[in-house]
Image (tube, rainbow, N blue to C red):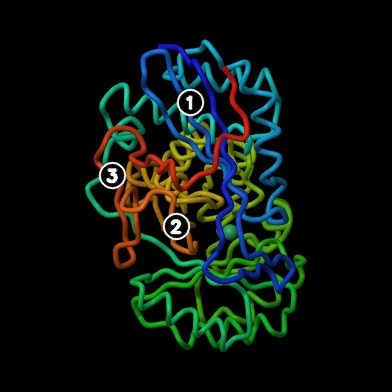
Amino acid sequence: MRISRISVYQLALPLSKPYWLSGGRLRFDALDSTLVCVETDEGVAGWGEGCPWGSSYLPAFGKGIRAGIDEIAPSLLGLDPRGLDVINRVMDAALPGHLYAKSPLDMACWDVLGKATGLPLCELLGGREAGDVLLHSSISTGTPDDMVGDLEASRHRGYVIHSFKIGADIKLDRERITSISNALLPKEQATFDVNRAWLCDQAIRVMNDMREFGGYYEQPCETLEECSKVRRATQQPMILDECIQTFSDLKRADALSACEAIGLKLGRVGGITRARRMRDFCVAVGLRMNIEETGGSVLADTAAVHLAQSTPETHRRATWLSHDMLSTDVAPGQGARNDHGVTRAPRVPGIGVIPESDRIDAACAVYD
Ligand code: MG
């Protein structure tokens, strides 16, 4: 089986409501997504997606994915898409780094492998765990009252784990954490995701002041070293997210005992192949994971749900569904959806999401 054509589609994904990260530093109301279709000489086609969470969250942006694919795609023509390690080595030789541009190509090749073998992706990634995949909400930063209002709306949609975006103004952050913690029900859990907005001394002071409330704290500062300092001076469990980009980052975080969990986002680490290696390391050393995407439609989300579904329940915290915050849908009725706070990987071969042709524009690039 050989790759005969790679088609690239740009897709604007409007959010249901505007989103603010970290004290209003990052505001946006639509995502710039890229869909990829990898076709083969045997008639099997696979779909992948790459979608940064806006352009200012990570060193990644929508146009960058398409520019990266333009460099890489010609090298993949004629290769067997089922040989995922070879595919990734060829991508690395064609363009070192630029992990997020490789993720949609890697994902599309995994979809081909699933369809060619007749197996859902989770079966190829280690086997389907019996339990459902627990979801968490993502709550945009705002006033304490706004955030408690969004908590109540998320609760009504079945979520019991909520990720609150805070950061930048530590006086207001104390008020946010206090109001939110007092509003949580006994069965609910909070993650306070700072998205790198605090300095070490701010993180240490706020977290120690807020110790009575518990909750996980996520990526309080910019770097792994800063977060590790904070971890040593505080009690609350910590999740590292943006600073874990490569396997080496993960190994270093574990060696520093810098976190209890990581955010494992397919797009950020370069796709399913690399995310699976990191997942397996986390299982081996006892780290928990939020396995999810950086953003995107139900296609990208469902790929991440397959990885979560094949991960021991003991090592999962929760999965976020980006598409649950969008006002459009490229594949109605398909893929992993929010079902009262949980989801599950589809039981059809591959990822199980094929975008509807009348919901996407013509290809913006074709390689054959
Ligand atoms: Mg995060």
Residue 272: horizontal and vertical position, in percent?
Answer: 48, 35
Q: Residue 166 falls in which quadrant of the image?
A: bottom right
Q: Identify the residue position indicated by label 2 in the image.
A: 321
Q: The residue tagged with tag 2: helix, strand or loop?
A: loop
Give the camera-side residue of 190 and 155. 155
Residue 289: horizontal and vertical position, in percent?
Answer: 46, 51
Identify the mark nearer the N-term, 2 or 1. Answer: 1
Name the mark on residue 38. Answer: 1
96 vs 48, left or right, is right
Q: The residue tagged with tag 1: helix, strand or loop?
A: strand
Q: Quadrant of the C terminus?
A: top right
Q: Which residue lies furthest to the left in this view?
A: 130
Q: The residue tagged with tag 3: helix, strand or loop?
A: loop
The answer to whether mark 3 is within 8 Å of ligand 1 is no
- Distance from disc 2 to disc 1, alpha carbons, whole Å, reads 24 Å
The answer to whether mark 1 is within 8 Å of ligand 1 is no
Q: Identify the residue position indicated by label 3 in the image.
A: 346
Q: In which quarter of the image is the N terminus?
A: top left
Residue 97: horizontal and vertical position, in percent?
Answer: 70, 31
- Distance from disc 3 to disc 2, alpha carbons, whole Å, reads 15 Å
Q: Which of marks 2 and 1 is in front?
A: 1
Write the residue at 44% across / 47% down: 286
Write the residue at 43% across / 79% down: 153
Amino acid residing under circle 1: Val
Give the camera-side residue of 35 and 280. 35
Vertical placement of residue 190 versus 362, above or below: below
Q: Do the residues labelled 3 and 2 touch (CB within 8 Å)?
A: no
